[in-house]
Image (spheres, coloured by chain):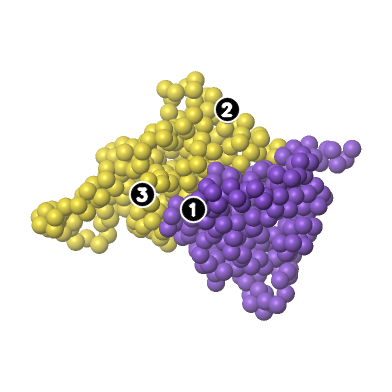
Chain colours: A purple, B yellow
Amino acid sequence: MLFFTQCFGAVLDLIHLRFQHYKAKRVFSAAGQLVCVVNPTHNLKYVSNRHAVGQTSTEQSSLHSHHPHETVHDPQLIPCTCPLFSCQWKGHVEVVVSHLRQTHRINILHGAEIVFLATDMHLPAPTDWIIIHSCLGHHFLLVLRKQEKYEGHPQFFATMMLIGTPTQADNFTYRLELNRNQRRLKWEATPRSVLECIDSVISDGDCLVLNTSLAQLFSDNGSLAIGIAITASKVHAAEAEI
Amino acid sequence: MLFFTQCFGAVLDLIHLRFQHYKAKRVFSAAGQLVCVVNPTHNLKYVSNRHAVGQTSTEQSSLHSHHPHETVHDPQLIPCTCPLFSCQWKGHVEVVVSHLRQTHRINILHGAEIVFLATDMHLPAPTDWIIIHSCLGHHFLLVLRKQEKYEGHPQFFATMMLIGTPTQADNFTYRLELNRNQRRLKWEATPRSVLECIDSVISDGDCLVLNTSLAQLFSDNGSLAIGIAITASKVHAAEAEI
């Protein structure tokens, strides 16, 4: 077991070595695994939400009166699922991915198993690291968020959400794995749908949660490598066969 | 994967069912696994340490002048490793286990893979759940602690320490696993030696850390089942063969 852990540690070292040499390339492969370098983005949505709380009710009502969602009544339209910005866009679930890519410049990565390499972990909260992960015929939104749930004590929250309905999400299992310095932390769960709010997933703590000290133990040079794998459940696999 | 997770969930349900029926028996087996029911103990050491901070320096110096450790100079003697009480006992590492069992009434359990079932998770911090786990020819101290590292925000910390030297500890890997409601959290690491202070392991966060919300997600009826496995590293296995 220790030998296996050491081997995985060596793979991560290799990843970081390649990262040093090929910084210009943002996606590369190491030891057969696809590595995606993900830069942080300051979370403007969370900041503006907090700012909104401080606004007077008059200001808020004047803002709401211009809110575009009051003019849209199609129940099949869903709001923008980007966790970073308060975006007023609405559209059908099929076009969410192209909206996220084009408007919010979120990268997309293909492959069932990838390594998500989040850089600059030291940046202050609120900060998000986001990619779209495409596999098994679906798109998943992977979000790592640094947030101060308790003031003065930032924590890291990592979760995966299916760009689809909750029923579709039930057909998958995702795994997030950290491995460094003879330590391994693994989280496995059914992904939530983007139709559910990511903020509530994080406030419920129903995701991989890391204290700053634990995140530092798994980081190397300020970067955190998270191994990601998605599998289809038996029911889904049987449906695919039919 | 989802199927496997569901199976493990069913095993945990079976454990809890048996727990309801055989509450009198504190150790039983479910689905081939040995389950140990561990009751909480209020941590008097942590409370008395916090209380000591409030004492005047005069009081502290008068306490220290009577401290037995000043009269013992044998470097091979180690202090009591019980995380619960401020115990003045000192002795050789070979007799630590019998001291913990006889004086502090800590239960001992044999087997490479066991389930640690901590009851009454709702009790206020500081509270500890402790057993001695005996396997592979060694004794390990398993500690689950509820502590308020940040005031008003209790967290759970779980770790395993070898009753032996740090060099001996390097020969093992321990795994703690939580599995419930289609979620799984796994922590793997090399155990620390009891010669290192458990309080520093917890303050460093170098262990399995759970927020209250995450602990509730994995709990059933106020009890948390932690699957435990210990393996010997290759080096140690080779030594055993010689």
Callout 2 secondary element: helix
- Residue B151, numbered circle: 3
In the rendered image of this protein, does residue A221 appear above or below residue B18?
below
**Residue designated by label 2:** B14
Closer to the observer: label 1 or label 2?
Answer: 1
Callout 3: SS: loop
Q: Is residue B99 visible?
A: no
Residue A74 appears in the rendering: yes
Which residue is drawn at the image coordinates 60% and 50% (left, top)?
A62
Q: Residue furthest bottom?
A: A21
The reply to whether callout 1 and callout 2 are in contact (CB within 8 Å) is: no
Place residue B130 in its image quadrant.
top left
At a point 79% along the width and 57% down the height, the residue shown is: A98
Which quadrant of the figure contains the C terminus of chain A? top right
Left/right of residue A108 with respect to residue B51 in the rendered view:
right
Pair 1/3: label in front? 1
Question: Which amino acid lies under the numbered mark 2 shown in the image of this protein?
Answer: Leu
Q: Which mark is residue A54?
A: 1
